[in-house]
Image (cartoon, coloured by chain):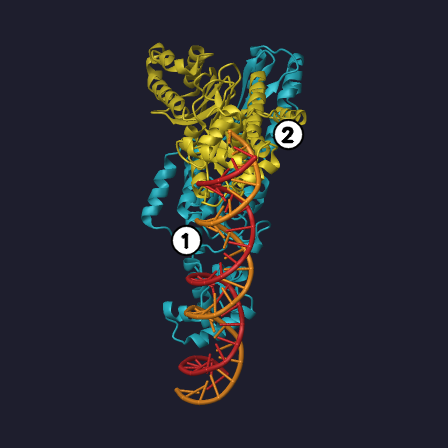
Chain colours: A cyan, B yellow, C orange, D red
Amino acid sequence: MVDDRKLAVLRAIVEDYVSAGEPVGSKALVDRHNLGVSPATIRNDMAVLEEQGYITQPHTSAGRVPTDKGYRLFVDKLSQIKPMSGAERRAIETFLAGAVDLDDVVMRTVRLLAQLTRQVAVVQYPTMSSSTVRHVEIVPLSEHRVMLVLITNTGRVDQRVIELPHVVDEARVAHIRAVLNAALDGCGLNRVPEMVADLPERLPEEDRPAAATILSVLLETLVDRHDEKIVFAGAANLAAPDFTVGLRDVLEALEEQVVLMRLLGDASDMAAITVRIGSENPYLQGTSIVAAGYGSGDKPLARLGVLGPTRMDYPVTMGAVRAVARYVSQILAAS
Amino acid sequence: MVDDRKLAVLRAIVEDYVSAGEPVGSKALVDRHNLGVSPATIRNDMAVLEEQGYITQPHTSAGRVPTDKGYRLFVDKLSQIKPMSGAERRAIETFLAGAVDLDDVVMRTVRLLAQLTRQVAVVQYPTMSSSTVRHVEIVPLSEHRVMLVLITNTGRVDQRVIELPHVVDEARVAHIRAVLNAALDGCGLNRVPEMVADLPERLPEEDRPAAATILSVLLETLVDRHDEKIVFAGAANLAAPDFTVGLRDVLEALEEQVVLMRLLGDASDMAAITVRIGSENPYLQGTSIVAAGYGSGDKPLARLGVLGPTRMDYPVTMGAVRAVARYVSQILAAS
DNA sequence: CTTGGCACTCGGGAACACCGAGTGCCAGGC
DNA sequence: GCCTGGCACTCGGTGTTCCCGAGTGCCAAG
């Protein structure tokens, strides 16, 4: 399978099928693309391509449709990511620049991506594991209840209400807070446990029970919140008639954070764009996922991407995902 | 229209149609319900009911289907809210009791409601307008950037990054924070503007520009966040074949916070359960909404509810919404 | 006011034929 | 050896027709 023309045929089939949505036949191919040969020749090529598993025909007397393997070859060898136009890039930039906080960045990103690609966008919250502690706040709520607020350098805020074992006055709370901040300021989240290990011993006897409770909740927060939040938008785009796969399954997957995490895949190389096509997905065959990492530094903090029908315009979608990932990274780096 | 039997017929039609999903005819009615009369009599009654606009027939030779007006009468006069079983109530209680913070309460509530009703659940975040300030935190992020964190008694936390007009050292920030907290502690959110009006004047000259910037952002936060957050879950239930209305429209509405707000309606009487049927809805005819207020005190802080096809089991749905609203209120009151 | 009888309507499904796009194959030509 | 035109074949989709049966409205009798 080193034949240039066969590759051209495959490319043409993918392009036509993606744009029209109908199986494409030999005659239509030679009409729309000027391959300098006759339909019969194309038919021979198609027979070979089918035998090799790149295309298939839904019914005996119908045109050909790319298989997952065909899309894969197309994405890997036969296409280039299509960059966004200047106008689109500026629109992305200004839209994202208006965000007021991390929540807002994520929210805007997911909506933007859904709108750009006309598909379902998925954005993972920046992970904490590589973040550092900016500030720990302990706010008294009542005599034996405080709220723990953890603020990280990524701008993420987590809070927990804590029941204390006994009444603690404000001065003690303030003291614990001061000690905690002194110990943790700038500390990487992954190093928090070791930093606080001996902390109770540095406090006066009477503060220790309260401090121990607070610390255990703090550690719990770190663990709990490690299972990341994920948001999605653009579910309305699922109503497009493309979706042969059960709409219900997709919607269910979207609401299952864990499944969504798996679909987005592991954070890997920052610049790389991951494409998972149809049956390559752990769940949800029939859909494809285009994802990329983003973050404020060189290493990706989290991932974002879109989920759509296998029959999607990969070059354009990849261009949109890449552009959005870049601009989000830029925004995050600036804050 | 004071005829008892006609009301019974309407009730029977609604019940049968809701459970079976097919237009119900006179013969089926007398078979399934023991009204002691013949099909012909029922037909006469149905003719009257149709003339009065309570039922309609999709095609000339088909059974009858309730109209929006018919459902309305059914909900108002012909049915009672069906209470949840003890087991269900216990399940709700324990599921909600596991929540760690407000976010979690809301998240759990919306999922629970979606699961209980097998429809799309919508939960509004507790509104701030009747909350009070628990604490204001100002965290230096860099030399000329701080983060403002506003914590209210409902446990809600809002944060904003603020660019300061010039470099401000930590001591000054601490001072501004102290003054701010002294002025606002326990203050109702609606009274914040008046409380901070003369605040810059009570600060030393050099602090005023920074304080003014921070205050303006604080006020902006109050206003911005007044357009409440809303979350939904259970979109997968839309895939049920009932939905004659455009699935796409519903999904779009769900992602438009503003539309969703309107649909949920105004917070009104705490105990009341609002039902909006089909065309009674501002947007999205063809769907019905069952909603209730919830909150920690007597007055509702926010609303929650479900959205489903007009053809829904109103008594059961209303029971579920009422039960969830009660238990959430209970949880909120306890924290 | 209720009831049985009866003619009428009409949506939906089954059976059927037709069309046309598309294919595979083959023999001839460059 | 590869390309090409020709040709017979397949089969999904569409349009047509027909039929059935559920359901209705109306009427006259109880």
Mark 1 belongs to which subunit? A
Element type at mark 1: helix
Element type at mark 2: helix
For the residues carrying marks 2 and 1, which lies nearer the camera in this image?
1
Residue A75 image offset from top left, x and y in percent: 48, 59
Q: Between B271 and A190, which is closer to the camera in this rendering? A: B271
- Please tell me whether residue A330 is drawn above or below residue B314 in the rendered image: below
Q: Earlier in the sequence, mark 2 or mark 1?
A: 2
Q: Between D17 and A210, which is closer to the camera in this rendering? A: D17
Residue B117 shows up from this direction: yes
Q: Between A252 and A2, which is closer to the camera in this rendering? A: A252
A117 lies left or right of A125? left
Q: Amino acid at mark 1?
A: Val
Q: Are marks 2 and 1 on the same chain?
A: yes
Residue B176 image offset from top left, x and y in percent: 41, 16
Q: What's the residue at 62%, 11% (across, down)? A: A167
User: Alpha carbon of mark 2 to alpha carbon of mark 1: how far?
Assistant: 47 Å
- Please tell me whether residue A7 is drawn above or below residue A144 in the rendered image: below
Residue A267 image offset from top left, x and y in percent: 54, 45
C14 lies left or right of B129? right
Mark 2, residue position: A194
- Please tell me whether residue C21 is drawn above or below residue A115 in the rendered image: below
Residue B235, numbered label: none
Q: Amino acid at mark 2?
A: Glu
Q: Would you say the residues marked 2 and 1 are in contact, meaning their CB atoms lie under 8 Å apart?
A: no
Residue A331 image offset from top left, x and y in percent: 41, 38
Residue A271 shows up from this direction: no
User: How many neighbours does mark 2 have within 10 angstroms: few (below 14), some (14-19), or many (20 or more)?
Assistant: few
Mark 1, residue position: A316
Mark 2 belongs to which subunit? A
